[in-house]
Image (cartoon, grey):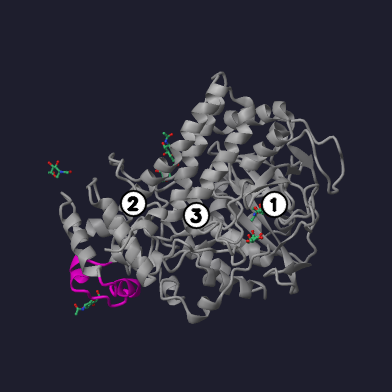
Amino acid sequence: MWSIYSVLVFALAAASSFTPVYVLEFCQSPDSDCHSDDDTASNSQSSPHTAKSRWNVSASNLVQDLDQFRVSCKKLIEAFPGDEVDGNFIRTVKDCIFSKSIPTPLKGPLRLAAVSKDAIEGILDLDMAVTQSEDFLLYASGGRLLLGSVPLAHRYGGHQFGYWAGQLGDGRAHYLGQYTNRKGETWELQLKGSGKTPYSRSGDGRAVIRSSVREFLCSEAMYFLGVPTSRAASLIVSEEPVLRDQFYNGNVKTERGAVVLRLAKSWFRIGSLEILAQSGEIDLLRKLLNFVTDEHFPSISSGDPDKYLVFYSTVVNETAHLIAQWMSVGFAHGVCNTDNFSLLSITIDYGPFGFMELYDPNFVPNTSDDEGRYSIGAQVNVGLFNLEKLLVALSPVLTLKQQKEAKMILKGYTDIYQMRIHQIFKAKLGLLGEKEEDSYIIAFLLKMMEDTQSDFTMTFRQLSEISQLQLRNRNFTQMWALDDLSSHKHFSDWLSMYFLRVSRQENDTDLDRQNRMKSVNPRYVLRNWMAESAIRKAEKNDFSEVELLHRILSFPFVTQETAEEAGYAARPPLWAKRLKVSCSS
Ligand SMILES: *[C@@H]1O[C@H](CO)[C@@H](O)[C@H](O)[C@H]1NC(C)=O
Ligand SMILES: *[C@@H]1O[C@H](CO)[C@@H](O)[C@H](O)[C@H]1NC(C)=O
Ligand SMILES: *[C@@H]1O[C@H](CO)[C@@H](O)[C@H](O)[C@H]1NC(C)=O
Ligand SMILES: *[C@@H]1O[C@H](CO)[C@@H](O)[C@H](O)[C@H]1NC(C)=O
Ligand SMILES: *[C@@H]1O[C@H](CO)[C@@H](O)[C@H](O)[C@H]1NC(C)=O
Ligand SMILES: CC(=O)N[C@H]1CO[C@H](CO)[C@@H](O)[C@@H]1O
């Protein structure tokens, strides 16, 4: 038999030390119905409009007037010393966490290219009607400041591509303030693409339509896939010319500027702590750590002498979980530098990301990343690297004993990841309980997928939609991914193992298996060609496809007529094969 080593590199199989049985809870959103099962039929004609609204919105409670919408920067400004130097010019900054920086308004006319109802109503408590106003275009692009806003740029550093890169910081993003919504959640609003800051280095402070459409669509799509992530509330495009060398090949093109209004519970990164440790600002390091733990890790008691250790342990655990969830949907982040890794372990900074289509552990979304440093299969190791750097940054505030313990905690990272991956892929196959052969069944399938270059998303989806009978009969009508997979010479062997395993599940029916699987295996992900097609239209001011994708990807587990018509679950079109990710952003 072939070696399953390469699958082990993908870190799926090695679960021999793992026994407990978990009920999977994929859904990360505060409400329980973020995964709408299509439990009637896979071809149900349910449109996203008929699906249940995610929020109990009673319109009267929503803010109708943006002039009434207030954010606050007080907490952050009071917690930390400010940048002593005033002025929005590029410099090395010391002894602070934030610098004041006013956004540079985009040149109009401005257009609202996309808006997330779920974020506008569910997070910001705003009535959707306000997004249609001229005011909104200004507020959401940096042309006017929200009540209470003192715009800030965050100072951070980071390890990029393996090396310490010194000061980075928000080079084209502005933190606008915090908003506490009626559910009691506090969110931080940020503009991206809103102009230069003291941290812009050689950048122009802008983001182009291309990269902004990708960030808007992907962060929303990830949320609806149940993966912890920052959110996007709106996307504004302008007529402001922005020069970009899209493929870093000397071919400079004029594109147009755009701004995304992004939301996260916190935007602090590993690099936020690293820069303080690197420059010996240890009091400030402690201050930032105390702030982050008090605000975002309520289970950590502020008097606990081990609190930084507990914090570290939490970040190690949640980062392992996050990367496992990326793998579960075939997501490759593309630039896993320490400045792109959130301390809250949410997905942030959508750049040259990609969803893996043909199953390949070496899939690299950034076409300039020749070494494959950030290939999909390398993400778990890069996570480990980044957590090591976090430990280095924490070391000045840990005792020697705590440093030793932290190293032990880090040693547990790989096990946590593998345990989670094992759970996730068991669920993707509809397996209940725990049997000795489970790791093998999973690794075997992935190896066949690799050999036959089967589509990652649709292989799992079609296994969810096909009945055992149809699978037994090898009737792959419309099951194109399974058709590819079945060309493997060991397909029958795997099938026998799988059937035997599933048949031993007590109280389980084939329909139950299908429904369970359909709720964790999406039918639609943001494939690169789908984003590209929407971007081409958006660049000509036709935002219909951005809207269509946004709507469809809000219900990734539900078969939708419009999505089927658009071919989003079909074999990718031929032109998709020649596509390169547009990297400069
Ligand atoms: C949502 O609305 C329904 C019907 O009006 C009500 O029964 C339910 O309690 C509400 N849920 C929340 C979370 O407010
Ligand atoms: C690890 O993180 C996951 C995901 O957030 C969480 O469900 C789990 O309870 C955590 N485990 C520990 C031991 O903290
Ligand atoms: C893609 O990879 C190359 C090579 O490592 C790197 O220089 C470039 O910055 C990456 N692109 C992005 C957008 O991060
Ligand atoms: C194959 O499956 C399709 C779709 O489920 C069904 O309509 C068709 O009758 C099946 N064909 C055979 C030969 O069983
Ligand atoms: C299966 O169902 C029977 C009857 O409802 C119950 O007694 C038994 O505990 C169930 N077994 C499992 C493994 O859930
Ligand atoms: C999309 C994004 O913001 N990516 C950041 C992640 O890291 C790279 C390199 O460290 C930065 O250049 C990007 O700004």
**How far is mark 3 from mark 1, CA to CA?**
30 Å
Q: Name the quadrant of the N terminus.
A: bottom left
For this rendering, which residue is in front, 210 or 481? 481
Which x, y percent locates residue 585? 68, 62
Q: Secondary structure under badge 2?
A: loop
The reply to whether residue 506 is visible in this rendering is yes
- Part of the protein shown in magenta: 466-489
Which x, y percent locates residue 454? 37, 70
- The residue positioned 58% from the left and 22% from the top of the image is 399
Residue 479 part of the magenta segment: yes
Q: Amino acid at mark 3?
A: Ala
Q: Which mark is residue 364?
A: none
Q: Which mark is residue 13?
A: 2
Q: Which mark is residue 191?
A: 1
Q: Amino acid at mark 1?
A: Leu
Q: Where is mark 3, residue-wise?
A: 378
- Please tell me which of labels 3 and 1 falls first in the chain: 1
Q: Residues within 10 Å of mark 2 (few under 14, many from 20)?
A: many
